[in-house]
Amino acid sequence: MSQPRGPLSQLRRGHEELVLGLLRKHGPLSRGELGKRCGLSRTTLYDILAALVAGGAVVTATPQEAPRGRGRPAETLTLNPDAGQAIGIDFARRALHVAAVNLAHEVVGSASEPHDADLPWEQRVELAARLVGSLTGTGAGALRLGALDAIGVGVVGVVGSRAAYDAAHPGTEPDGGVAPHPAQMLLRERFGVPVLLDNNTRLAALGESIWGAAAGGQDVLYLRLSHGVGGGLVVGGSLHRGAYGLSGEFGHITVEPGGARCDCGGTGCLETVASIRAVLDAFRAAGGRAADVPELVKAVRAGEPTALTLLDGVGTRIGEVLAALCNAIGPSVIVIGGELAETGAALAGPIERALHDHVMPVSRHRVSLRRATLGEVAGALGGIALVLHESPLLSRYPAGPDLAQDPTPDKELR
């Protein structure tokens, strides 16, 4: 099990992360080069390096042959790619996605598996353990995280505050404080390491902004069209979580006043128009036949007028919402992800037209609309970013193993 972290252990951990970060950024370095870059005393640096080498996180690089007439080259140190992995898990509504990255930031692999929407959390965690084992070669019963020592997890819905409890248990009062999310507790028990938790769609936005379609963007709006509709924001180069973890709920912007009832309790939300269920129900009601998104995509590619007309209307509503968000937030990049993005130009075209028609003219040619590139594992990769916590996007973002716990007393949140 993980040990409590006092001030001295936290300081030492910070020194380790500093050294690991320099090796990750610059590649193999000598002890002297590390000393110049890290600012630690020689004694402290050598002590940290000795521990990292003993633990297997850092190894001696293969020395290059010295030029003739010169002395032996200085020994260089480098990250050991086999020292452990950062694990990201995305508990989506009807599927589980896992990704692993080693100390050198190389993606070890990813895996996904669908499941029933009502699968109990105990079975979801068992599935996660099996998928993680398939990536790391440890099997389902063991996992060696090495120097990274944490798992990043995305879940559906609001997390990180009293608001999360209220959303899951409306009209009731928590007994003894707000409990951690079931996934967080079960994973801690299973692997014995801290579990960093956040909304999976916001983590997908983080993943796309680091590794995907919006890499390098300072102001990014991410929208995922899946079984739910949600998103995430990167504002001024930092991922935006919002008060009580409530940012990115774009699916609950009203687009049809008095429309269909939404799971959030409202009516006419974008999610009642642009989620997978809403789109498939509307397609079938109009006479089309599609049991899932792949069948809808087939209808689109076949040029079925019913499918094209439906997606034109859905795309228009989405574009209008995005235009309003652009006028309020001012992103330079919009990324569209989720299964419904597989419908391609039939949906993207109307989105782009509506965005063009409704965004402020000064912004019209400055906003880049892009399709997500990371696919199903975007949220899992975002979870890994939480573990590494090295991207500038996380510079003002909450960190630590107890992200799901809100330290603010309940009375201040009500």
Image (tube, grey):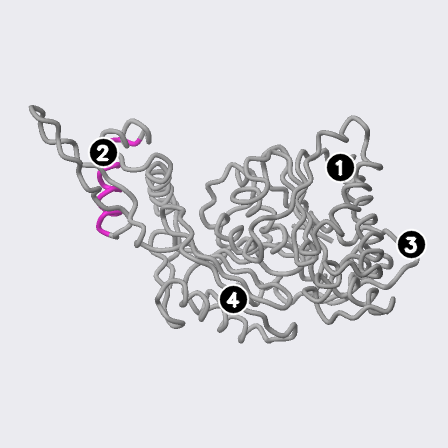
Asked whether the viewer can see residue 336, the reply is yes
The x and y percentages for residue 64 are 17, 36
User: Is residue 109 depicted above or below 40 in this figure?
Assistant: below
Secondary structure at numbered mark 2: helix
Q: Secondary structure at mark 1?
A: helix
- The Cα–Cα distance between marks 1 and 4, rounded to whole angstroms, is 38 Å
- Estimate the spatial distance between the alpha carbons at disc 1 and disc 2, rounded to whole Å: 48 Å
Q: Which residue is mark 1?
A: 326
From the viewer's perspective, is residue 227 above or below residue 363? below
Callout 2 crowding tier (Cα within 10 Å): few <14, some 14–19, many ≥20: some
Q: Outermost residue, left direction?
A: 69
Query: Circles 1 and 2: CB distance less than 8 Å?
Result: no
Task: Give the mark toward the camera: 1 or 2.
Answer: 1
Query: Residue 14's spot in the image, x, y percent?
Result: 38, 41
Residue where numbered disc 2 is placed: 31
Relative horizontal placement of residue 172, taking residue 187 as reference (left or right): right
| Magenta segment | 40-54
Query: As drawn, is 273 to the left or to the right of 226?
Result: right
Point out the frontmost of discs 4 and 3: 3
Q: Main secondary structure of the magenta part?
A: helix
Question: Which residue is tagged 4?
Answer: 185
Q: Which three-letter amino acid code belongs to the residue tagged 3?
A: Pro
Q: Earlier in the sequence, mark 4 or mark 3?
A: 4
* 1 vs 4, front mark: 1
Please tell me in which quadrant of the rendered image residue 182 appears. Answer: bottom right
Three-letter amino acid code at the position of disc 4: Met
Question: Mark 2 or mark 4, which is nearer the start of the sequence?
Answer: 2
Mark 2 in CB contact with mark 3 (< 8 angstroms): no
